[in-house]
Amino acid sequence: MSVTVRVPAKVNVQLGVGGLRRDGFHDLANVFFAVALGDEVTATAAAPGAGTTLTCTGPDAGQVPLDDSNLAARAARLLAAHHGIEPDVHLHIAKDIPVAGGMAGGSADGAAALVACDALWALDTPQETLLALAAELGSDVPFALLGGVALGRGRGEILESLPVTGTFHWVFAVADGGLSTPAVFHECDRLREAAGTGSADTDVPTPDADPALLAALADGDPAALAAALTNDLQSAALSLRPALAATLAAGTQAGAIGALVSGSGPTCAFLTKDAEAAEAVAAALTASGTCRTARATHGPVPGAAVRTR
Ligand code: C5P
């Protein structure tokens, strides 16, 4: 018996980063946006005592850890422990989301594994409980369950769904090699210290969602959304990976109406006026030699959901 769950990647259309908290996290005003680029996680029943096993296929499969640190395996064990059952399951990840790319691919797999195992084991766990378990796994995991567009507060796990009209068209330029999320947050703190503003949560004002950005989403206005895109981690990602400046410039030159680093990077996200423009920008970016590959997609799309069982 098997259950396959499809789960979206995310881009942050606003990533407001507050100061460093005493627990090592940063308070965020994080507007998550789920896009059609996604992974599939299949949970297959395993014999009693088999434990949790993992395989992965896809272009970046070689970079996915298949040990206990994998968020999908951790999710299966966490859900089983919550219900007092054994985590006997084989998980297969069909990976299309860039690894360590700033698109929450690992978090997506964690969310997908929660939903897949919940269905496989017929647990019927309430959504509220799944969201709480997801928050234990990582700051971006709850959003992958929810999908759509949502404002994340706290470290990103306190979510409020946001109204959106229509579909927005995106291009993602995938870089060679990933960036470590903790390293990018650390670089953000270092740049703030170097600028003399301080980096602690007592130095940096708590960020808030930008009303112009929320209105652009609600109105379905790509030009207004493009003008409001912001990422407080962008200067840190550019500091660690200066070549990303050329990627951002190439996409803008090719006709994107908005450009920013996705989350902690190094994937760059480009907003376009329609689907046709997205295909043209993706082709131009691929030809530019400033990224490994570029993908046209759209959103918002729903969160982790069972596709087949
Ligand atoms: O929650 P998650 O495991 O995805 O976070 C990975 C790391 O990213 C954290 O250990 C922390 O260094 C950094 N982070 C942060 N503030 C957040 C989210 C993540 O500093 N709000």
Image (spheres, rainbow, N blue to C red):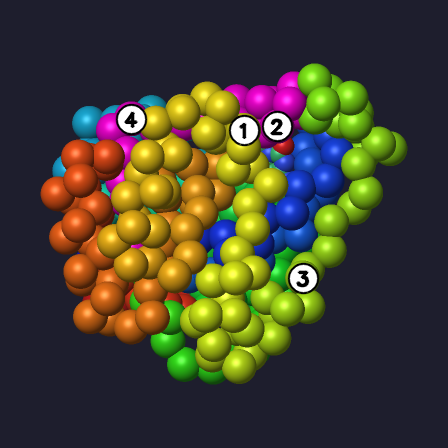
As shown in the figure, which amino acid type bears the numbered disc 1? Ala
Of 248 and 88, nearer the camera is 248
Identified by mark 2, the residue type is Cys
- What residue appears at the point 56 percent right and 37 percent down from the top-left corner? 233
The residue labelled by disc 3 is 210
Q: Is residue 86 left or right of residue 162?
A: left
Please, what secondary structure does the residue beneath circle 4 have? loop
Tell me if mark 1 has few (under 14), some (14-19) or many (20+) residues whose alpha carbon lies within 10 angstroms of its own.
many
Q: Earlier in the sequence, mark 1 or mark 3?
A: 3
Location of the N terminus (image quadrant): bottom left
Residues tagged 3 and 4 counted as in contact (Cβ below 8 A): no
Mark 4 and mark 1 lie on one chain; the one further toward the N terminus is: 4
How far is the residue under mark 3 from the one under mark 4? 32 Å
**Residue 63 pos. (x, y %):** 26, 27
Separation of marks 2 and 3 at Cα, in angstroms? 20 Å
Q: Give the answer, above or below, for where 87 lies relative to 170.
A: above
Taking the view exactly as shown, the residue that stands out farthest to the right is 202
Dot 2 or dot 3: first in sequence order is 2
Are dots 2 and 1 in contact, CB under 8 Å? yes
- Residue plotted at (52% across, 37% down): 234
Say which residue label 1 marks: 236
Query: Pointer 4: residues within 10 angstroms few (<14), some, or many (20+)?
Result: some
The answer to whether residue 134 is left or right of residue 286 is right
* Residue, disc 2: 188
**Dot 4 amino acid type:** Gly
